[in-house]
Amino acid sequence: MKNKLSSILITFAFVFVFVLFYKGLKNTNIYTPEKKINNVVPLFTVDLFSTGKKVNSIELFSAEKFYLLNIWSSWCVPCRQEHPLLMYLSKNKIVEIIGLNYKDKKINAQSFLDELGNPYKNIIFDKEGIYAIEWGAYGVPETYLIHNGVIIKKYIGPLNEELIKEIKSLIK
Amino acid sequence: MKLLKLFFIIFIIFSLNHLKANNENIKNDITKNLRCLTCQGQSVYDSDSEFANSIKILVKKKLNEGLSKKQIYKFFKDKYGEWILYETELNKNTYILWLLPILIFLIGGAIVFKNFIFKK
Amino acid sequence: MIYSVIGYYSLILGLCFSLILIFFSVRNFNNSKLLDPKILSFTFLQFFFVVISFLSLVLSFVFSDFSNETVFNNSHTTKPLFYKIAGTWGNHEGSLLLWLFVLTLFIFIFLLRSKSQPTKYKILTLVFQQIIIIGFFIFLIKTSNPFNFLFPTPEEGLGLNPILQDPALAIHPPILYLGYVGSSIIFSSALSATSLNLITKTWASHIKKWVLISWIFLTLGILLGSIWAYYELGWGGFWFWDPVENVSLMPWLALTTLLHCILVLEKKLILTSWVIILSIATFTLSMCGTFLVRSGILNSVHTFANDPERGLFILIFLFSLIFLSLFIFFFFYKANKDTPTSFFWLSKEAAIIINNWFMMYFLSVVLIGTVYPIFLDVLSSQKISVGPPFYHKLIIPIIIPFLLMMAIGPKLKWIKSNLEDKIYLFILLVISTLLSFLIVKNFDTNLLVNTILVSSALYLFLITLRDFFIKKYNNISQNIAHFGFSLLILSILLNNFFSTEIITNLKVGETFETENTKIIFEDISQKKEKNYQLITGKFIIQNPGGKIDNLSPELRIYNQPNIVTSEADIKTTIIADKFIVINLVQNQEYFNVRYQVKPFMIWIWLSVLLISFGGLTSLIKKKHEK
């Protein structure tokens, strides 16, 4: 009797394990952090790209309006691809864009902007890639939509036409 | 006796050689416990990806600012989620993880002693 | 082209032989007292066709036949011949073919070497083994055919992942698989012996050989993987508690436990059910490892191709085997009521059973740590990481009594022992505690824990060392293995305590100086190699005491596929390894330089070799006695 009970229990345990593994197979094994939104803008002091002036990060996003923070670099290929869209946003004054220049050389970054135009109101110069971490980013490009000092949306990877539409509707 | 001598010599050699614990060592301890997001499965300490290198610099900066180990872990946990910490905390997600092995150990011990060793 | 055809049809033929073999086995099982000679020849033929198939894959790789998809995905014409051949099993399809190759080889050897065993037992073992083999055949042919055609034939292959182009890793899979597959023989044999109620002392000494063989290969396989990780992955670590490493450690733990249990079973007919469970568990864990690694369910440093369909197949196959063995165990196993099951507390049996208890604990820690994140993700979508701190915290406290048991256990006699004439056990304990205190004293971290840890390892070390000299000790293999283990733990501990490292960014010509070490980045040179571009840094290290080392770490920029790897330069001496790596930093002129002094590294490798050598002497001794 005892033997029978234990055999049934063990069988059920293995069936349970099987089901867990089976479901686990369908999950992806690559981790992407949750797109935590409604976080406040992180506080840190940064160098500005153009002037080299030290600025408090919160000041950059202080006005009661929408901002777009875009992490970019001259060596990043997808950044080149999304750049015209950023130009479009800034030219039509849809949203104010703050850039975060990630692990770049100043000369390269400048010639990138000279070539493709500069959509950024201000650029945070992040030579060592540490301010990107403050934002919870882990690659380039990433884009954050900010309203009243709160991050309301996060995009990993390059922007595209559809996302631009989404941003536009969010701003309205 | 010979053995004792040998160990004594080794001990002297290494006591001279050893670098003192400092921020650098604490930084290494911390980065060994952070998991790299771009080369998943390696610690930040072991990885040489761009992301990992930045984290190393940031940890050092935070240490210099006087943050404690715990505060730094919390900082990264807030940014990237619990996944980034190799050392899982004891919370409702991980009770089973931490307690099940201990339970198995105790049950195993009970079986061993009751059934085999002190069985009358 | 032609090789793919030959290879593929050989596989089909091999599968046919499985079916024929089962048919003949069933007939033979009911009718005959003797093993049908046809069975042996068919087993050989099956092995033969798998060899043909394997060889045709090897030849496709050697001649870079890119009409074969596997070759196209994993090879390149500029790759050196050695890695072309090693590339055969450096990928999913080829490695499974290797599994099959070893499976058929082992069952053939098993039949040859088990002449004196009962016929029914041999036949039944063969049937169980064929069930496994059929599973692998179908898996190979259905989901991972190594001989898929590509048309039109590509001009050039995609190349092998550069970090896999390494001598240690080239021979690591075959060795590891010999261990894994050896456990399949134990599995089949245990199941067949259970069904026939043949679990006896004779069976124990017969299967012990196979346990030893798989154990030796598994140990060496893990060692090779670890050595590879040491100089290819990461920065000077050799064990990361990565899931893929854990997966090879789990069968090893089960097998080690089994090895000790078999020793008891061989002498006294006790613990029979436990031995059966362990035999089943060992192979199940090996299969589980294959599942976890090949399905891509895990997140690991080691890159493997992921395919959920393959994962599903192995999963179903694995659980069918588990349920089959559970069924056999519950319905056929009859506990032997006559033998006593209790031991005196101070006896060898008690020591071994306590050893089993500890081993099972270690196994459960590793198992739970490895699969828990998967289960948690499924059940609650929470993603966590289980890393080294978890394993260290749970394993280290128990390793202390474990080491003490390893030292004292072998000193005890069967049935009942006493502690007369054993004063030296106590004296050595005092000596080792004092010594470890001296060693650990000058570290500001955790004096108590480290002293206890070192002293328990040192205790085992001293006791086993003493045994080499003192008695005409008859169990030399056990002593070698235990001695090796103590050396392993000691080297790991001391390595941990005394490792020092310097991390800095340097440009060519710059020098970095600490109180006692000076690193000079002298020069850098570029060279074009066959399939990569080589950048070599020249470093001069001035050590304390004025000794100078020249080290030249490399960066390799592979063109096919385009990956940069850093090759550490390691200078190994008996006392310490000097380890230097350089890395490129994005958009900077300087290199990231890491220099480490890692004491006793070589002893870690040597001690593992010693452990497996202990197993080997046991195997040889057995032959000698016969």
Image (tube, helix red, strand yellow):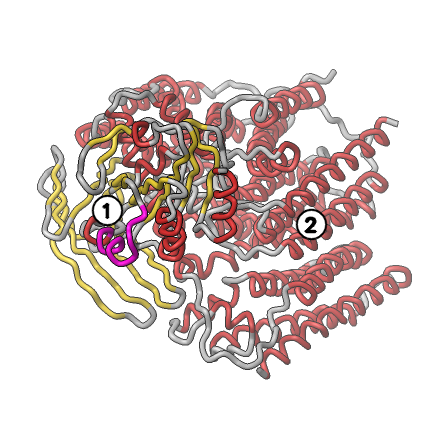
Task: In the rendered view, tell whether residue C446 sits above or below residue C173.
Answer: above
The amino acid marked with disc number 1 is: Asn
Which residue does the image show at 50% across and 78% down from the upper left?
C154
Which residue appears farthest toward the front when viewing the image?
A: A92
Task: In the rendered view, tell whether residue A54 sits above or below residue C73.
Answer: above
Q: Chain of mark 1?
A: C
The location of residue C420, given as percent across then percent down, is: 51, 18
The amino acid marked with disc number 2 is: Leu
* Residue A124 makes an appearance in the image: yes
Query: Does residue C421 appear left or right of residue C442 in this picture?
Result: right
Residue A112 colored in magenta in the image: yes
Disc number placed over residue C315 in the picture, else none: 2
> Along the line of sight, which residue is nearer the eye, C380 or A72?
A72
Q: Chain of mark 2?
A: C
Q: Secondary structure at mark 2?
A: helix
Q: Earlier in the sequence, mark 1 or mark 2?
A: 2
Which secondary structure is most common in the magenta stretch?
helix
Query: Does residue A144 appear left or right of residue C351 in this picture?
Result: left
Query: Does residue C456 appear left or right of residue C517 in this picture?
Result: right
Q: Which residue is mark 1?
A: C592
Which residue does the image show at 80% across and 30% down from the upper left?
A6
- The residues colored magenta run A109-119
Q: Quadrant of the N terminus of chain C?
A: bottom right
Which residue does the image show at 74% across and 60% down from the upper left?
C130
Q: Secondary structure at mark 1?
A: strand
Q: How many marks?
A: 2
> Along the line of sight, which residue is nearer the eye, B51 or C33?
B51
> Along the line of sight, which residue is nearer the eye, C372 or A131?
A131
